Amino acid sequence: MVDLRICEPETASNQIPLFIWDRNYADPASVTSIYSNKYIDETQDLMVTANLPSDNPTYQINFRTISTNEEHPIAHGSRLELTCRVPYDGDQEGHKAVFTVLGGSLAFYSEVSLGDDKIDNYWSLHVWNWHEGGQPDDTYVLNDGYTLVDIRFLTAEKLLALTSHCCIELYDVENLSTAPQIQARFVLPVTLQILSLEYPSVFHSTSSCEDLTAPDERWIWTTVPVDRVICLRMSYPRPILVISARLLLVDIPPAWFDATSEDGFAVPWSSWGPQNSRYFLRESPRFGVAGSRVIRQVLHGSSLRMHMTDFNPSAVDVTTYLPYVEMVNNDPDFDFFHRIILDEEKILMFTRTDTTERAMDVDIIDM
């Protein structure tokens, strides 16, 4: 891990040693587990691992530090046992577990697919505070039929879930003494797609940027929560759907809901989509998103150029649906990169080296 607050571009090469990730490091798998998974939150030096033993339908969830692989100092206990609420058949192929963390909030999704063709799906969703403990066994959502493809916190009080039926579900998780409450199910304009949510879990706030400006100045790139955007990656024809977070943080007009839907929570694409989203084709599979900005590669003739698109209303003097401004970098050195990560201050561009070693170069760009 590299702390970008003290690592500057001109000194990075002297401070960052060659790092090779050991795939077996802190592997949560056990010879007696039928399923295991791990989640890393580098902002809290946190690694969460889960094992589902072959002889006991109880997930063993551990909280360790990434840096030392020891018990995390602010976890409420180093291990939590969570009863598997979906049918348990001891089949390694049928089980799946997914985590997401934001601050002290942790969401855990458990799924099992049964039957000869693995088409009978059951899942449970639990949310609790891993700093304070709690009883995730007692409060959870239980469902079947469709499954959740991805889960992400939007805020500590709101959780997003991407479903196998190509919808984005919005859950209220503010009260951890009750089960997550679904608030809306936003229908997407696609079917039979491989989808994933793309946005960072941590955003800057006004208070975190106070030391970056003089008292009489305003830190222009501080992202107001409702001005953030999230990205939805689709498999074909490789588009990016950029969605305004404002849609998910304000009250939803009652007229938007489809009263004829089975549970009344469905919001058709025609009600929410055109005025709250933008659609971009992807010439490259790699892009980055943070705050109100999206960085992507666009084909110019025979070469790719990096485009930065900013949806911050303070930077746009246009009245339209989800307006934006865009800057293009014509530097050919950025044609090809392995991964891109950004926040409101810096861009990290990872490129593979020409050596045979498992290593990458990192370009750190100030914004």
Image: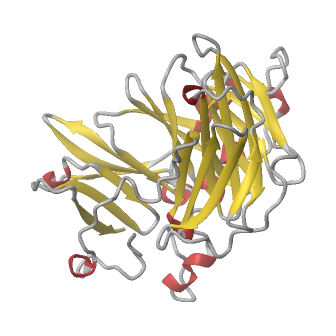
> Which residue sits at x=48%, y=73%?
68
* Quarter of the image where one finds residue 264: top right
Is 213 rendered above or below residue 311?
below
In this orientation, which residue lies closer to the viewer: 357 or 15?
Answer: 357
Q: On the rendered structure, is 209 left or right of 57? A: left
> Which residue sits at x=65%, y=27%?
112
Is 125 rendered above or below residue 356?
above
Say which quadrant the C terminus sits in: bottom left
> Which residue sits at x=45%, y=63%?
343
The answer to whether residue 149 is seen in the rendering is: no
The location of residue 263, given as percent across then percent down, is 85, 22
Give the tally of numbered discs: 0
The location of residue 349, given as percent across then percent down, is 29, 58
The answer to whether residue 133 is seen in the rendering is: yes
In this orientation, which residue lies closer to the viewer: 28 or 301?
Answer: 28
The location of residue 193, given as percent across then percent down, is 49, 21
> Which residue sits at x=25%, y=64%?
363
In this orientation, which residue lies closer to the viewer: 55 or 322?
Answer: 55
Q: On the rendered structure, is 78 left or right of 134? A: left
The location of residue 365, given as percent across then percent down, is 30, 67
In this orientation, which residue lies closer to the viewer: 304 or 13?
Answer: 13
| Render colour scheme | secondary structure
Q: On the rendered structure, is 49 left or right of 20? A: right
